[in-house]
Image (spheres, rainbow, N blue to C red):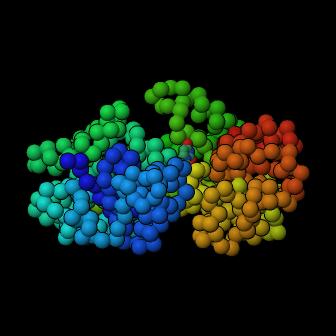
Amino acid sequence: MALKITVIGTGYLGATHAAAMAEMGFEVLGLDVVPEKIELLASGRVPMYEPGLEELLARHVAGIEGSTGRLRFTTSWEEVGAFGDVHFVCVNTPQKHGEYGCDMSYVDAAFASLAGVARPGSLAVGKSTVPVGSAERLAGVLPEGVELAWNPEFLREGFAVQDTLRPDRIVVGVPGDDGGRAEKLLREVYAVPVAEGSPFVVTDFPTAELVKTAANSFLATKISFINAMAEICEAAGGDVAKLAEAIGHDERIGNKFLRAGVGFGGGCLPKDIRAFMARAGELGVDQALTFLREIDSINMRRRGQMVEMARQALGGDSFLGRRVAVLGATFKPDSDDVRDSPALNVAGQIHLQGGQVTVYDPKGMENARKVFPTLGYADSALEAVRGADVVLHLTEWREFRELDPAELAAVASSPVVLDGRNALDGERWRAAGWTYRAMGRPRA
Ligand code: UDX
């Protein structure tokens, strides 16, 4: 009989994982402790913007006309325990307040509840990003007969559906003493993507946990590396975009994740590298990761450098009374997530220094308003730019690349645009009368 799957925690990761498991043909039960979230999901809607997710969900949520009915939601742990052969734990592990470490309280609470209800013979699978060593500890919380596997998730916001249905790789950490049972069950769960070519890597608990933090640290390092090169280019008159293109032709380096600009943000990279450093300290090997401190500070410095670039564009004086249009609020395009967003941070710094900031973002306005209610907001890029002394492009939405620079030049007070993502077509903007400058590139 086909395995029955539960997904515990229906945030970004959990909602996507639950929908993907239903798409693969399994009966799925999603649990969350927040009843409003469950009500929303049960009606086929998602509490965030993620391309394709709502459609995928609606295709499977029970009770929706024409759906397969394979996906249901609940707030009842008893129901989860009775239902599931495989339980995926997908809860959040945010940064601890005021310190680097990772807040494990949601994971610990989820495992404690699951331990009270899981049937003997069932498998618990951790997907959350956790400090290395957590799986070993959590295995001890589960009752006799309930195994644990660790199966980190690598999905990117904006590509969550495709990353979940066709992952680059599936990594599973399994206990050495269960006779291969955990691996066998997970091979059954992931039979479809594996058949379609996703590599299946089996390893021990610590390695599985580390694959996730190592991968995110490597990605953060790539971005900060190119941003460090951007700083050098700015001082020496070089062009970081050309530099990235040229080094990227070397296959050992590769051309991805070398886009210089205002740097990385979001709910993962910044907090994951910090939690990794904190864990290395606990393990007595903090020196192994001191380079991540530098990666973090290069990244945070970019935000201040963007503020400085804006000040210079306005003549080098204070921002008082100057009108600044900010295009973008989310930490990346195709997402409504503003967590640790460089765009919003830059907008906030200029606002706090007395600038009159007007922000526009295609999907992030609601969340931005919640985080930073005192900023000015406009309903369109055109309205944000109206009367602006300088325009900052800080999140590379397609909508911004497709703007008509001539139309914007007609409403701006002074046609100066600073590209903090190296994503606009500078020639096109210049041809329409704009002074176009980009981070890490020479002035034309
Ligand atoms: C990341 C990892 O990519 C993913 O595998 C992991 O599961 C979760 O964390 P995500 O946070 O969704 O995913 O975003 P990602 O696409 O990695 O971008 C992170 C940040 O880096 C964004 O702010 C983005 O704008 C920035 N970035 C990315 C750059 O500044 N330059 C680049 O070249 C690439």
Q: Residue furthest front?
A: 65
Q: Left or right of 428: which side holds 93?
A: left
Q: Quadrant of the C terminus?
A: top right
Front residue of 362 and 52: 52
Res 315 visible: yes
| Residue 104, x across and y down, in percent | 33, 66
Res 221 visible: no
The mark tally for this picture is 0
Q: Residue at x 85, y 38 (%)?
A: 431
| Residue 100, x across and y down, in percent | 41, 64
* Above/below status of 377 relative to 422: below
Q: Left or right of 346: which side holds 51?
A: left
| Residue 159, x across and y down, in percent | 50, 46
Q: Left or right of 328: which side holds 115?
A: left
Q: Residue at x 75, y 63 (%)?
A: 378
Q: Left or right of 46: which side holds 289?
A: left
| Residue 164, x across and y down, in percent | 41, 46
* Above/below status of 253 relative to 113: above
Q: Residue at x 20, y 47 (%)?
A: 1
Q: Residue at x 85, y 48 (%)?
A: 407
